Amino acid sequence: EYKEEYSHPPEKWDELTELVDGYKLRNDKVPGSLDYVDLSLELVDKRFTGFEHFIESEDPDLAVGLIRATDRVAHHYWETEVSDDNALLQVYKRVDERLSEFLERHDDEDIVIMSDHGFEKVTGKFMPNKVLADEGFVHLTDSGDSTKAAL
């Protein structure tokens, strides 16, 4: 199970899975299928619900939420023609709705929204792990993972 690896303390995993009636880290449906899109939309909702719950119950100084569905769906459903039934558009609309609701509820807080990559030429860089370490929010270890080190 994921609780030891992805939850601290591990008991928070149980709290999360109870809150959202099951929590998944990854979409395990077949990419390209309608089931994949449906589960992607469900995972967006579960991530926002869980994130909001822990912000309210824990009142952290720093909280980081991750929405992976936009990236994953883009890999499998990218279309040059945009239509109402476009899977990527559906997922972005859902994220936009949930993010708008979240921002309205937290309009008195400092919030940074960022993407790990985009679709334009890179003209600069921002290393959040370095900023967080410099400010004392995280302590980094050498995991040997160059991707993590680059952040």
Image (cartoon, helix red, strand yellow):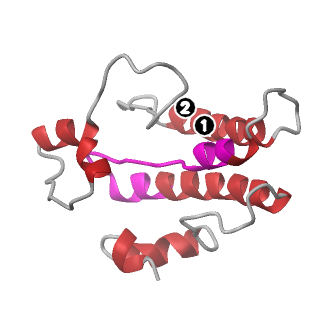
The residue at 54%/39% (across/down) is: 102
Which numbered disc covers residue 9?
A: none
Give the image location of residue 110, x and y in percent.
35, 30
Count of residue discs: 2
Residue highlighted by disc 2: 104
Residue shown at 48% from the left, 54% from the top: 51
Q: How far apart are marks 1 and 2 (CA)?
A: 5 Å
Span highlighted in magenta in the image: 53-75
Q: Check residue 55 for magenta coloring.
A: yes
Cβ atoms at labels 1 and 2 below 8 Å apart: yes
Which of the 4 image quadrants contains residue 114? top left
Label 1 secondary element: helix
Inspect the image, locate mark 1, and give the three-letter code of the amino acid beneath it: Glu
Compared to residue 131, the image places residue 149 above or below, namely below
Placement of 16 over or under 38, stated as above or below = below
| Dot 1 alpha-carbon crowd within 10 angstroms: few under 14, some 14 to 19, many 20 or more | few
Amino acid type at circle 2 is Glu
Residue 132 placement, left or right of 58: left
